[in-house]
Amino acid sequence: MGIFDNTLKKLEKAKEILKNLEGQKVEEVFEILKSPQRVITVTLPLKRDDGKLEFYKGYRIEHNNFLGPYKGGIRYSLYVDEDEIKTLALLMTLKCALIGLPLGGAKGGVNVDPKSLSEGELERLSREYVRKIYDFIGPEKDIPAPDVGTNSKIMDWMVDEYLKISKKKDIYLLASFTGKSVQNHGLEGREEATGKGGEIILEFLTKKLNFKEPLKIAVQGFGNVGYNVAKFLFEKGHKIVALSDSKGGIYCQDGFDPTLVMKWKEERGSISDYLKENINDSKSKIKITNEEILELEVDVLIPAAIENVINQDNANKIKAKIILEMANNPTTNEAQKILESRKIIVIPDILANSGGVVASYFEMLQNIKNEKWTKGRVFSELKDYLFKAFEEVWYYFEKFNLSLRDSAFTIALKRISQAYQL
Ligand code: NAD
């Protein structure tokens, strides 16, 4: 079974919950959500710097727009295929609904390793992608953003290409893409917002549970999301005892300062050798693998890289008390069952990592109204949105004894169904 069908299974459970607990019939809307509304597949020719012509496969999948224009990131990775992008688009539909944003769900991607391209090649490929999907994009239609392998520079190229094709100077068209650089009408704090949201949500949960602090935390994935969530949690006084990127991980019982580790990674390319030169006490430091990081004795485990890393092979070995899903879909359905039976609390992706799309929504508002938001305003309004969503999820969790994931999916489905009825 593919990951899209696996994610639909979670939604099917939410459909049953709505029927059993609240007598709501959501069959029809569930049937509709089983298929994306539009699947755009494109072939992107790229002339490499050495003159060779290559072709890359790209997607933009618009899952559902009952609540508003489609919204979702663009991923550059060799794992990109239709099933992955379709699943991420469905998760965006549910995430926007859960948070109460007037937006639907979409996702895009190109099957490419961005590290294998020069900067010029990356720019040409990104502009070609926009030329191919231009007709479907715009502030009232579909608004892309960064995701794995893309960043604000790529969004700047994309919006520039979009404006060139549109031949219009309307300021509000800048809202066609979010996650742009701050110098180019992007939002202060957008880059950090997904990580900030994770920190906020984790704090809401630990307060409800009266959890003893400081927390011992392990973070798998040290890109935009993993780094920022680790940085904010470190600044709050928690101990970041383990970090990893695609090349492997590091553990230190006394904890790391994520900012120092990131500085090292930027200069040297990977964090796995950080220990050699930076921590002297040999007993407290070890290199670990990306499998080992998931099984450490910690309070909180944060998967912030790729899908399906927590699965039936390792769910029984996980020792964390809380899993904060900053990556999309890091836990398989089989693993979720095992974790539930072991009373490990999983904060689901559509809640944990929703800070990014909330900030993207603020960026749209900023562009449409031609305003300039401060980072303080962004983080304060972000907290308000997340508080409301968290409290709703918590209400279902307590009242009906559901998992946090079932609560979140149920609320999302209910909201989409209400929009459909209207
Ligand atoms: P990124 O490309 O900036 O970083 C990904 C990180 O994961 C890199 O450090 C990479 O080395 C590491 N990685 C890759 N494969 C790995 C593996 N097998 N084991 C361990 N680490 C590995 O991407 P990102 O934007 O930080 O996104 C990370 C996750 O967060 C994705 O699942 C993404 O969909 C999700 N997410 C991102 C945003 C956002 O605003 N960027 C918002 C919501 C959710």
Image (cartoon, rainbow, N blue to C red):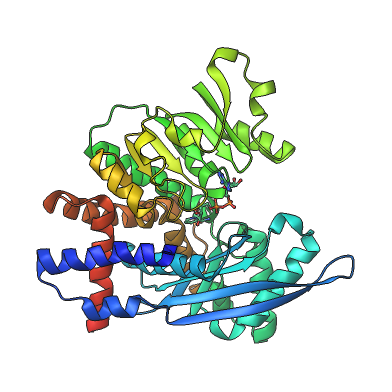
Establish if 377 lies above or below 295.
below
Is 315 placed left or right of 223 in the picture? left
Establish if 210 lies above or below 220.
above
Numbered-mark total:
0
Q: Position of residue 299 (x, y in %)?
A: 36, 31
Please state which of residues 329 and 352 is positioned toward the viewer in this rendering: 329
Establish if 388 lies above or below 311.
below
Please state which of residues 173 and 318 is positioned toward the viewer in this rendering: 318
Q: Quadrant of the C terminus?
A: bottom left
Residue in the image at 65% along x and 73% along y: 57
Please state which of residues 13 and 192 is positioned toward the viewer in this rendering: 13
Q: Quadrant of the N terminus?
A: bottom left
Residue in the image at 89% along x and 70% along y: 51
Q: Position of residue 347 (x, y in %)?
A: 33, 47
Residue in the image at 54% along x and 42% along y: 227
> Is residue 178 visible to us here?
no
Q: Position of residue 61 (x, y in %)?
A: 50, 75
Q: Position of residue 174 (x, y in %)?
A: 58, 73
The quarter holding residue 418 reads: bottom left
Establish if 13 lies above or below 370.
above
Is 127 placed left or right of 25 in the picture? right
Residue in the image at 32% along x and 80% along y: 32
Is 35 placed left or right of 263 in the picture? left
> Is residue 222 visible to us here?
yes
